[in-house]
Image: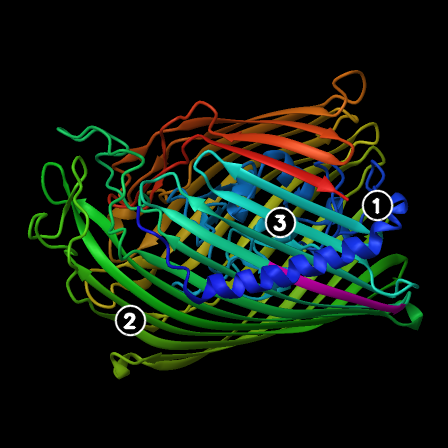
Amino acid sequence: MTMIKHRGFSARLVLNGSVAIAALCAVWSAQAQDAATTLRPIVLDGQGQGEIATGPVKGYVAKKSTTGSKSDTPIQEIPQAVSVIGREELEDRGVVNKVDEALRYTPGVSTQPFGTDPDTDWYYIRGFDASQTGVYLDGLNLFAYGFGNFQVDPFMLERVEVLKGPASVLYGGANAGGIVNMTSKRPTDEPYYYTEAGINTEGNAFGGFDLSDKVNEDGTMRYRLTGKLAGGDGYTDYTNDFRGFIMPQLTISPDEDTKLTVWASYSGLDQVHTGNGFLPYEGTVIDRPGVGKISRRFFPGEPDIDTGRYNQTMIGAELEHQFEGGWKLTSNFRYGHLEKYEHFVYPYLWAGPTTLQRIGFEGDTTADTLAWDNRVENEFELGGATHKIMAGIDYRYYRIDNVQNSIFGAGFPPQPVDGSIDVLNPVYGQPQPTMSPLYNEVVTMNQVGFYAQDQIRFGDGWLMTLNGRYDFVHTDFDNQLAPTGSFKDSDGAFSGRAGLAYEFDNGLTPYVSAATFFNPLVGRGAQGPLKPEEGEQYEAGIKYSPDFINGSLTASVFHINKRNNTVAIAAPPWTDQLGAVESRGVELEGKVNIDDNWKLLASYAYTDTEVTKNDPNPLLVGKSLYVVPEHSASAWVDYTVTDGPLDGLSLGAGLRYKGESWADEANTKKVPNSTVVDAAIRYKKDDWTASLNVTNLFDKTYVEACRGEGACGYGDARTITFKISKVW
């Protein structure tokens, strides 16, 4: 097997890791004399009273969120569906390296259409791809273009939240179907020391630490230091990776009214790509004569040249201050820098009875992002109603230097001269032809938005939510291969949301809402710069938080219209905005902490997408979008023994069902449904926990999705992950 060359990342990460381990030892030494009095993390009460909207979730049931309102708000009061995956659920289900793994049980969300993709998280929400314009960290956008995407390790996170439907009224340009908002761990009020180590059946191992304590005696300064290293083989031949991060934080609270948190993170990845996400329909979904199904472990590239690496740095600060008169100021800032390099050969379509054509690709990306959000909020009585108001201004900047080269037919003899590779008898080590320039562009986007929100309580249980926002965006697109393709463009748009709900005394809250959205795009179509996507959503539903059990249940129906949809055309630049799409559906989600022993979640989603306009190809009107299944469902149950000789033993099992989806735009080829079973067993004793998680328990071979006839991806093989951890 080809050895990974870790280059500069390994040295820097090992150095950072050594510093972190030294700091860890120093902390343990300082605490050794006081070990008996070390406190555990704060335990929230069962009904969520006292829960902080960005803090730990008790069991599986979150009661509050900031994602749907930008303020600490009960989920019952948000007039859109919101799903929350807390730290405990992430641990129970064995989410290790990627955030998109965390959303496998979330209704209305489809993930990993190419199967495992170590350097990118993929999300489809209510039918629309949210991977580049729908990803947020701590409420600040992580916009991406091309290969300029930032990635976050789930070990950094306290919770992952999904707001279904348009979010432009709060965040500016955002995906039509919804957003994924990742909430970072923050310094804790009580001392917390945690370490873990694990390995899976492919030999991919990991180790991490998470430490938090006060810096000074009065506790006005608190720190948190989180880090992780992981690496080893993947489940396809020749693939392997080495990844890690370190994240120091400091919170300063000079008084009860002020809190400032400053933080930084450095992370990186070095890999040989997992190459089975771009396989043909025939040979994966259906048998190919003489081949049958291509092996799930087949590597279609060139292991000796395959390189994928990124180095990613972020710094940020969060400030909260409470003024007299009830006014609260919040300011949130983050800067990120990304350097990413890709060099690989990937398959295309069949070149012969058993051979696949291949494409050589190289991408060199540098991206910078800056986001800054400032808002004030207050609550007061006016006109017989209680108003909780918020107003703010935010700014975001994104710049990418995007260089891509490619060649069709990447490879020479002893394989056929067309560069293809035999799936039954692959021969590696072929010399590669010189690639030609594909893109060389520098893109800069600036966006500023002004927004306001009023949550109005009136009558006996009525709640109205009103939002308004205006955004201005300027894009500078510098095409260095074809200067005539360069442009500067400015757009502005208003977004709004209106929601009405009624809270019954028994915890039942029906609601209705309407919202518009605005989603700026980067690039050029046949008629000039791409216009922002725009449209609206109508949603109605019922949220139920029963008073007799700690649970949260949501049922919602929705209808989204998206205009300025980008469609394919038959001449350069190959795209134009001559399309429109609708998405409608039903989503059901329930999460319950039944008692100290049982935790349960279940979900179902029906998503019906339809092309309502496609001027270049009217035959596609009435067709459904590919990738997204019409039906999906999931369930997970976890049982913990709390007394007797088996005290501390936990058993978990889950089922994920993904219905049929289309593999092509013309809706002539289908990807069949699949049902996958996951399982877990844990044992906790004296602050030690040993866990065994199994993904795809019965090792089912299935295709996750196809994005066209030549881009089908297998789902994960059975993977068993063992982990041991300790709270000190």
- Which residue is located at x 35 percent, y 51 percent? 273
Cα separation between marks 1 and 2: 52 Å
- Which residue is located at x 36 percent, y 28 percent? 701
Image quarter for residue 647? top right
Q: Which mark is residue 208?
A: 3
Q: Give the amino acid at mark 3.
A: Gly
Taking the magenta stretch, the answer to whether it contains residue 241 is no
Badge 1: residue crowd in 10 Å (few <14, some 14–19, many ≥20)? few
Earlier residue among tags 1 and 2: 1
Name the image quarter holding the N terminus.
top left
Answer left or right for 505 relative to 559. Answer: right
Image spot of residue 245 (x, y percent): 57, 58
Image quarter for residue 626? top left
- Which residue is located at x 18 percent, y 41 percent? 426
Answer left or right for 166 relative to 644. Answer: left
Which portion, as a residue range, is magenta? 246-254
Q: Give the amino acid at mark 2.
A: Tyr
* For the residues bearing labels 3 and 2, Cβ distance under 8 angstroms: no
Q: Is residue 691 above or below residue 439?
A: above
- Residue 588 seen in the figure: no
Circle 1 or circle 2, nearest the eye: 1
State the SS at label 2: strand
Q: Which mark is residue 439?
A: 2
